Image (cartoon, coloured by chain):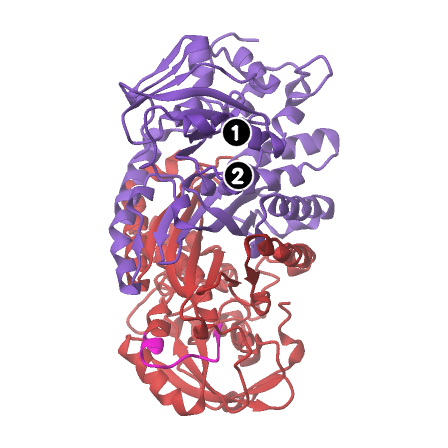
Chain colours: A purple, B red
Amino acid sequence: MTTSSLTYDQAGVDYDKIDPLKIAAQRAAAATATQLAGHGFTEVRASRGESAYVVDVGPFYLASIVECLGSKALVADEMARLTGKSYYAGIAQDTIAMAVNDLITVGATPLVVQAYWGAGGSDWFGDAQRAQALVEGWQRACETCGVAWGGGETPALAGIVEAGRIDLAASCTGLINPKQRLSVGDKLGAGDAIVLLASSGIHANGVSLARKLVERLPQGWLTPIDAQGTTYGDALLAPTTLYSPVTEALWKAGIAPHYCANITGHGWRKLLRHPGHFTYRITQVPPVPPVLEFIAKHAGHDAQEAYSTFNMGAGFALFVAAEQAERAAEVARTQGIEAWVAGRVEVGDKQLLIEPLGLRYGDDALQLR
Amino acid sequence: MTTSSLTYDQAGVDYDKIDPLKIAAQRAAAATATQLAGHGFTEVRASRGESAYVVDVGPFYLASIVECLGSKALVADEMARLTGKSYYAGIAQDTIAMAVNDLITVGATPLVVQAYWGAGGSDWFGDAQRAQALVEGWQRACETCGVAWGGGETPALAGIVEAGRIDLAASCTGLINPKQRLSVGDKLGAGDAIVLLASSGIHANGVSLARKLVERLPQGWLTPIDAQGTTYGDALLAPTTLYSPVTEALWKAGIAPHYCANITGHGWRKLLRHPGHFTYRITQVPPVPPVLEFIAKHAGHDAQEAYSTFNMGAGFALFVAAEQAERAAEVARTQGIEAWVAGRVEVGDKQLLIEPLGLRYGDDALQLR
């Protein structure tokens, strides 16, 4: 087993090629905002660059998003081949989580999910067990989030999607109602507390690297990662936590987060997402899920790299008024999700300080806008 | 050149494999409608089985959808290889048309489009000309439809999407406002007129068959289809007509369609979409776009098969009060889209009669629900 460090670039995603398109698309998209005036509406400008797009339609705000799963289905396919089990119920939850967990960051209540299941050919749908797992998992995740599954698309895309594979995405529409639930950044301030919500594992970000790592493992996907013999593949496939039950329960408890960050790609650097200049001081770190500890060890990542790539046990961050922080964590726990009052927002240079680990990420660590 | 008929099954889409999953998904989706009650909302039940999903959120209805392009991008890729041109501005319009033209059938004003561009790897985005065409075409189509481009996803999906290919989809969210614009079927009645709106060509449905046909053409994609030397590939790549400017102009002109059908897969059988029992009598057929005439001829389709597969010159159908029919067609023409008062809805067996061609499609011709 080699001990050289495995980076994200080696895992095959080259952001230098994608970023110019992303920037061009963002500019073109921003230019279309004026179209809403023709209907008597306006965009919430601060939502550009946030995780969901928000339009003011009068009595409430409308939020919408489309998100894809990424490459986690490839792990499910490998594990199905090795174990004979179907992992697609979990994969369905992962896909919905990608959309819902982003949508709620702006204060929205998710209402409708649409399914996009692009298969590599009609044959994909011929495996009844797998198809049924996808349907059942999708329904269950919708029920957990209190959303209606509106419909969707199940195209057979031979020649575009690879044979035997499926490209999964979800769109989600929600309302910010009442309008004071809107959280697009203007409410965040020094003195706010940072409440971290537990992740269930890798979720669906950093999976390309996790897949690449398999080549280094003598037993591959079936390598045990703990004393109980949980395999690497099974651990990776733990479904992503759905956080909308927490944000809905918070509102019912009278707590409106000042800001939220869904901790996905770029790991904890997502805590720097807000455009303002603040220091984010973390004084307590959650326990690291065994699968992420395992990856860090075998990929040769130090803590600096691991926390900038993976969620490391914190899948979602709530920024709330300091006096509501403990109560917010309790509300999360009533929804079955562990939570920690993990730090605070301070006046200072834009940086993230993870004190227990002696880590610092500066202003240049995250370039999203 | 063989003269045997080329059917859709031969083109590689096997609905027998997809349909059981679709039915299971539709049932599971319908079961989630009760989730909306927790937010004080209800679904518009009649929208299940229609082209977009509708929720009653109080002051207005919320409509949403996700739709994919299908395989038309493969035609663009082939033609780019042969001509050096980029066709992705048109492909962008096609993708948005798939979503917007469905959304407006329920009476919705489209407000926000989200882009889903799943590439076979980072390399796809490295072709700056092609990427720029996609961005510009997407922006222009949004502007034509008066929608804001909210954002989207540009994942690199090596191992899922084929290298060098892209899986394109769009989600669209809109409002039905005021609520009397809702058209989910209850307003359709005997005596209503059928107004057909012109298509620009194949749009993005029936493309698998059109691609398969290339094997039969001695000059392939570059086969001329008319006296001007327009190639088969160029003709296929005419961007799909965007119909939302028509439906918006109709509303401003005081015309609320009783029902709408987006004529996509299954061709004119989509005129049988409404769940009620009516006879649809067509007394005038629009001119057939040369590319569709060409396909019918070379695929060996008779009129019965051609009209049940392709739009044959009619991309969208409006069902309006008879006394508003001529005015509706005029409104469409002011938006640059040719229109014909082509027939009427009658009491009778559920069937579509295309009288000028002597065609009949019965109750069993379209199974969507």
Please tell me which residue lies in front, B118 or B321: B321
Callout 2–callout 1 Cβ contact below 8 Å: yes
Mark 1 is surrounded, within 10 Å at the Cα level, by few (under 14), some (14 to 19) or many (20 or more) other residues, namely: some
Mark 2 is surrounded, within 10 Å at the Cα level, by few (under 14), some (14 to 19) or many (20 or more) other residues, namely: few
Residue A337 vs A135, above or below: the answer is: above
Residue span colored magenta: B249-261
The residue located at (49%, 47%) in the rendering is A109
Residue B13, picture quadrant: bottom right
Residue B263 part of the magenta-drawn span: no
Residue B109, picture quadrant: bottom left
Label ID, residue A253: 2
Q: Chain of mark 2?
A: A
Q: Chain of mark 1?
A: A
Please tell me which residue lies in front, B159 or B64: B64
**Callout 2 secondary element:** loop
Q: Which residue is mark 1?
A: A327
Who comes first in sequence, dot 2 or dot 1? 2
Residue A227 vs B214, above or below: the answer is: above
